[in-house]
Image (cartoon, helix red, strand yellow):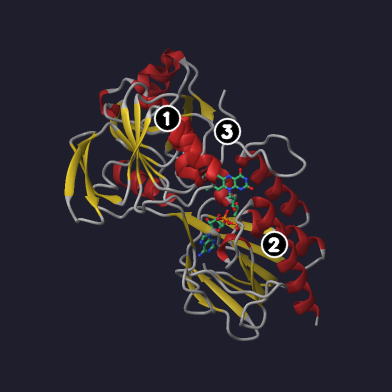
Amino acid sequence: MLMTNLEHVESAAHHKEVLENNENVMICCGRMGPMCIPVYISMEELREEYPNVKFMDMEFDHPEAYVIRNAPECSGFMGLPFTMYYKNGKVVKATTSIQSKDQIVNILNEVF
Amino acid sequence: MHTQEQFDLIILGGGAAGLTAGIYASRAKLSTLILNEGMVGGQMILTYEIANYPGYENISGYQLSMSMKKQAETFGCVIKQNITIDQLDIQGEIKSVKLSNGNVYTSKAIILATGGSSRNLNVKGEDEFKGRGISYCATCDGDFYTGQDIIVVGGGNSALEEAVSLTKYAKTVTIVHQFDYFQAFEHAVEMAQKNEKISFILNSTITGFHGDEKLKYVEIKNLKTDEISKKEIDGVFIFIGYAANTSKLKSHIAINQYGEIITDETMATNVPGVFAAGDVRAKKIRQIATAVSDGAIAAVSAIEYVQK
Ligand SMILES: Cc1cc2nc3c(=O)[nH]c(=O)nc-3n(C[C@H](O)[C@H](O)[C@H](O)COP(=O)(O)OP(=O)(O)OC[C@H]3O[C@@H](n4cnc5c(N)ncnc54)[C@H](O)[C@@H]3O)c2cc1C
């Protein structure tokens, strides 16, 4: 279990349900490591500013995290975390490795 | 609407040094503001496991930094993170800091605790292949390279120790280093030299990263002969040291040839009312324990200055 204040994606079925019920979704899939923690914290801070976006995380080593690990958009990714941005259930952006809060804000403004 | 607020003390940087200074100053009843560009915790957050900070046999850098932050806030210290500093005026009696959102904060004294950042190679392809073959964290990304061929760039303790730890996963590890000697401690060099999976390319540096959706090969320049060769590779881990975060400070304050702030033993700089603490200042040992020590001394000096 990730020790963050974000809502966690618990399974592949939950992932599907979240995408079906929310127009704009950002999910950070990682571990409690130094490249991932700053991304979770930025997401926690951005929740208020972006009420139209559902911010969640998912444990990278969860067996059902294959929904992100094996996504075609993540092919070639070799750095944690894998961060996904979905609009109407479709991946509109995916990033690998640490991103600064400014980089995340730029993506949110661009895709949502 | 922009705000303008006054404090007794402003601390730039919320790493180990800044947070400690915040704890001491707020506990002494100085109204204290910590302004941090990026995430509070600084380099501690980049550390999976800290085994040499007194009082904790083993603690993650994240936990240690969150506990320092909480302790500072308990004493009334105000902490703002992920801010951007637009303008600094620290020469006069009143120090002022203007943020990019237009807010202005003033104080009687200021502590500069902006720490250090890891150096990049700054060569072609480095940004493009970050997370697609280039990594700065062996513990985070090592397992992606199981059974593969990788390069570690650097010749200090981090580079050599991480190269050895990466042999748990990688088929081969090649250390590329710009000199023909290492800055690392003797035992770290010995461990790397003894490891059968590790080989060395010395007097050399990477000058370019190439691939498609993943890194495929690097260009390596021999710094003695200027000869450039190509090497096919699955991953590159870069550990080439840290540089002081003084780009926004150096026009205001005396620094040495490495860009580090010069202080006396009370952490005072050449500007009255301006103190510096932690990795940002010119010193030999850069550790959490020494940053904490600097932070405590700088805070006590700032308290004396404000109450003079
Ligand atoms: C991977 C790694 C492992 C380490 N392992 C250990 C270990 O096991 N034990 C140990 O004792 N030490 C370890 N260290 C060293 C230790 O982390 C540092 O010496 C110490 O944390 C430095 O603290 P600091 O407060 O001086 O600076 P930093 O931690 O660098 O904090 C400075 C803060 O200032 C912020 N900042 C930068 N510029 C500005 C600006 N212009 N305005 C406002 N804020 C700014 C930064 O975002 C940062 O939060 C490690 C370092 C690294 C990188």
Label 2 chain ID: B
Is disc 3 on the same chain as disc 2?
no
Q: Nearer the viewer, residue B29 or B269?
A: B269
* Horizontal arrangement in the rendering, residue A65 relative to residue B234 (left or right): right
Marks 2 and 1, how far apart at CA: 34 Å
| Circles 3 and 1 in contact, beta carbons < 8 Å | no
* Horizontal arrangement in the rendering, residue A84 relative to residue B305 (left or right): left
In this view, the mark in front (2 or 3): 2
Q: Is residue B139 above or below residue A105?
A: above
Secondary element at tag 1: helix
- Determine the residue positioned at 34% across, 21% down: B147
Crowding near pointer 1: few (<14 within 10 Å), some, many (20+)?
A: many
Q: Is residue B219 above or below residue B275?
A: above
Q: Is residue B17 above or below residue B156?
A: below
Residue highlighted by disc 1: B142
Residue A58's disc number: none
Q: Nearer the viewer, residue B118 or A73?
A: B118
Residue B53 position, x and y percent, is 70, 44
Sequence order check, earlier mark of 2 and 1: 1
Is disc 1 on the same chain as disc 3?
no
Q: Nearer the viewer, residue B9 or B113?
A: B113
Residue A105 position, x and y percent, is 39, 48
Residue highlighted by disc 2: B295
Residue B230 position, x and y percent, is 18, 41
In this view, the mark in front (3 or 1): 1
Q: Is mark 2 within 8 Å of ligand 1?
A: yes
Marks 3 and 1, how far apart at CA: 23 Å
Residue A4's disc number: 3
